[in-house]
Image (spheres, grey):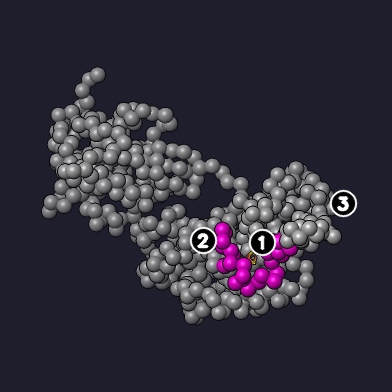
Amino acid sequence: MGPLRAAAARGLRRGGGRGRGAAPGAGKGSKGSAAPGGRPAPPAALHLFGDPAEVEALRGRLLAWYDQSKRDLPWRALAVTEPDVNRRAYAVWVSEIMLQQTQVATVIDYYNRWMQKWPTLQALAEASLEEVNELWAGLGYYSRGKRLQEAARKVVSELAGQMPRTAEELQKLLPGVGRYTAGAIASISYGQATGVVDGNVIRVLCRLRCIGADPSSPAVIDRLWAMANALVDRSRPGDFNQALMELGATVCTPKAPLCGECPVKQHCRARLRVEKELALASRKLLGKLPPVPDVEDCAVGDCPLCPPAAEPWDSSLGVTNFPRKAAKKQPRVEQTATCVLERRGHRGALEYLIVQRPSSGLLAGLWEFPSVPLAPGLQQEQQREVLQDHLQAWTGQPVAAGSLRFMGEVVHVFSHIHQTYVVYSLPLDGDVTLDLASSPSRWVTEEEFRASAVSTAMKKVLKVCERQRGEESGPAKGSKRKRGAKPGAGGSTRPGTQLSLRAFLRAPNPP
Ligand code: SF4
């Protein structure tokens, strides 16, 4: 269960809608794949599990392997031991949402703390968004926690605390629950015989059945869901789905699959193809020409499941020819100026000013250092002026641009944004009056900052400041700043020296 999991599930939800009912022949790739009457042609045998005996054997082997090799994970234990069906579904649901885009090893601690704090839907429904964000801080993709809580509130207030009992109902009634999550909750918690398709399942199925077309394309998405639903074991659907995902996470890994240890290698057509190619190569080495044609993709011209003609099978990749990388949208490139305002608190400890983001949109409700988006292509001085204007509007007082000290840059990649934070600091020796109507703000110690609902990016911002301070305070070490610090107008910016409030609030010198 790796980072591909939610991406795939999301893509599949999107694509599932488009795929069904798409006009055959409308796309280039589908030419030749339509049957008479306009219906999509059935997939070639290469891509099918057409033999019921093989399906039975595969289920048996996979489940036997899972029983022996599965990892001991807290949500698995709860799914087995929790007698209350609503609590069980909730426990699985939380794990599935946390595992989207996040590694198992990272999730375990978050999961345990979450379930300890909010062991039931009712407890979560009563929590504040602030508490949810605080516990979620560092897990990324913060809207997941917020949506989970919104959905829990809906179950409590509109569904009398009863979780919907089928995959279809879960997907229909709960915000943030897509096809994958619904299938996982229903199969694991209720024993509904419904398949799941996440990044790990995509990889395993594409290899088992030599599917090399773009895994985010509607034709592939539909085929994979159909395959997952057909394969799922009727008596142990939850275990089967987890076994398939476990196989993808631990054996059939993206770059170095352990085919020799694979419990379903007998059923793997990617592996078969590699074996055939090796046999062919050794025959050629021995000067024996093959009596039959080389290994083929499949017998269907322009097959929507085979690798595209422009990217044929590459022998050097072996089974990792499958799956192909999904067409990826390039993230937006953005820049933000952010300012670490700091002062000495009552007991001498350094304190930082943080403000709360709006309750909707990216990083909703999280706390951050005062920040402002930058237009592309601004020079350093222009960036500084933008930040200066922002701070002035916020404090209602003039700010000397020169008192803002450049500390470095932090790059943070969100799912769809490549964000660069240009970090400045501004030490103060007094308080400032803030426009509390525009956004809530508070002073926090470093410890409080780390316990607050702040994003990983903001933790990196603080680290840059601390590192910079550390470098500057070391007598032998020179500054490694990319851009030189600019002393404030009349204010010293030596490390450790607090800028006077008067200097901070002094109007910039006229040009
Ligand atoms: Fe994956 Fe190799 Fe097993 Fe095929 S044999 S499913 S490629 S690990």
> Would you say residue 284 is visible in this rendering?
yes
Badge 1 amino acid: Arg
Nearest the eye: 84 or 321: 321
Horizontally, is 458 left or right of 122 in the view?
left
Badge 2 amino acid: Gly
The x, y position of residue 193, in whole percent, is: 65, 72
Nearest the eye: 347 or 73: 73
Q: Where are the magenta residues, as a range?
A: 251-280
Q: Residue at x 70, y 76 (%)?
A: 57
The CA span between labels 3 and 1 is 30 Å
Tag 1, which secondary structure? Answer: helix
Residue 36, label in figure: 3
Q: Residue furthest top?
A: 511
The CA span between labels 3 and 2 is 41 Å
Horizontally, is 127 left or right of 292 in the view?
left
Tag 2, which secondary structure? Answer: loop
Residue 2, label in figure: 2
Q: Which quarter of the figure is the C terminus placed in? A: top left
Residue 207, label in figure: 1
Q: How many marks?
A: 3
Q: Is residue 490 magenta?
A: no
